[in-house]
Image (cartoon, rainbow, N blue to C red):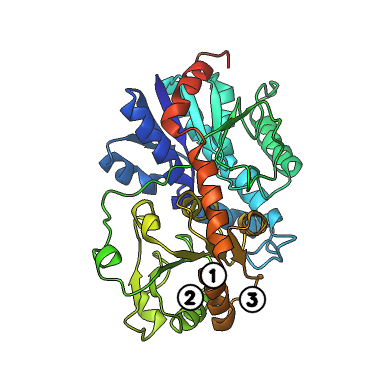
Amino acid sequence: MHVVLAGQSATGHVYPLLSLADALRAAGHRVSFGTTADLVPWLNELGYRAAPVGQTIPWALAQVQARSPELTSDLPPGKAWRLDAELFADALPRSTTPDLVGLLSALRPDLVVYESTAFGAVLAAAEVGIPVVCLDLWAVGHWHVDRGELEGRVRAVWADRTGAPLRVDPISGMAHLDPAPAALRTADDHDPTRLEMQQVSWGDPALSLSPWISSERSGPLVYLTLGTVGWGTVGVLQECLSGLSALPVDVLVAVGAHFDPADLGPLPASVHVARFVRQDLLLGEVTIAVHHGGSGTLLGAAAHGVPQLVMPMGADQFQNAQALVRSGAGLALSHGGVTAQTARDGVLELLEEPRYRTSAGELRREIQAMPTPAATIPRLVELAQSPS
């Protein structure tokens, strides 16, 4: 079959799609991507056909804030959902849907799979008449925004395009591939459209693992990251590093493209800095993961049985932190509560208390028991043959 994968231009959104894309391609299926223009050359280099559709998240954010200046990234946790609802369920699908309608009309694929924030894809697939499936990103099994708030906005975009009834679920499509293991799930387990599928970490083949990680370490390895989309500040990283440097551990910090490594200042020999790392290769070597609580990083560490210290700052990170703590596989620092002392104390507790590693091992076994992307393909073939 021919599958079109659709997603936003953010690492945490496109990497899960690439894990599925690689499995589909290995099974002999054709794969095309619809995403923003900035990712097209890179996807072409990976051997995938890709077409530019819609605008980027920063572009959409500017549109939302131009009409609603109060919707900033500094909203308190209880109100932060408003920004994401307007961003992902209104501004982005209005930008993306027309382009995707053109792409799908030209390609006529057998199936569309979209990551769970790319609502323009479910609308475009419905308009063209192609079966459509959602690949969920969420570690706990559902959005951090109320479903009704999302659905109302997505349906409004549809109503502005066509007077026809929307015959597919505007949030989940015909079915949704859910990566949340039982210990983290807070959603309805009786959802008939839910298909379990573990989120297999994907790594950019252009990156490699530094040899010192496996051969030259002097102690446990702590992996520190705030993700690739600029969560937090250099100050948060500096506080963490100040606390971790007092422990007998090696630290690898990934700063992404948003910070200059030099901004971290002088660092001890036990701290190593990189812009990007191969998490799929790295996490098997990690003793403790300290991060922002994004679903991709949390699930990746969980799949390797790594205890985690999370520092939630926005989006899905708060619900992820709560679920992780409930599972017993990690700890969470309060919003705004990251200091050298709290980071040091959190990592020290994870190192010294064996119950965290025991719970992390149980979480790992749950994930390993879930179907892989490759094992899910036969069900996708069945869905592609269903009436859209």
Residue 62 lies, with reference to residue 219, above or below; the image says above
Badge 3 amino acid: Gly
Q: Nearer the viewer, mark 2 or mark 1?
A: 2
Residue 237: which disc? 2
Is disc 1 placed on a helix, strand or loop?
Answer: loop
Residue 125 lies, with reference to residue 367, above or below; the image says above
Earlier-in-chain disc, 3 versus 1: 1
Residue 210 lies, with reference to residue 134, above or below; the image says below
Give the quarter of the image for residue 51.
top left
Q: Please give the name of the residue rendered at 50% of the width and 13% of the height, measured from the top-left corner.
A: 385
Q: On the image, numbered disc 1 is attached to which residue?
A: 232
Q: CA distance from mark 3 to mark 2?
A: 13 Å
Q: On the image, numbered disc 3 is attached to which residue?
A: 337
Badge 2 amino acid: Leu
Residue 354 location, x and y as percent?
A: 54, 64
Q: Quadrant of the C terminus?
A: top right
Q: Quadrant of the N terminus?
A: top left
Residue 293 location, x and y as percent?
A: 56, 59
Is disc 3 placed on a helix, strand or loop?
Answer: loop
Q: Are marks 3 and 2 in contact (CB under 8 Å)?
A: no
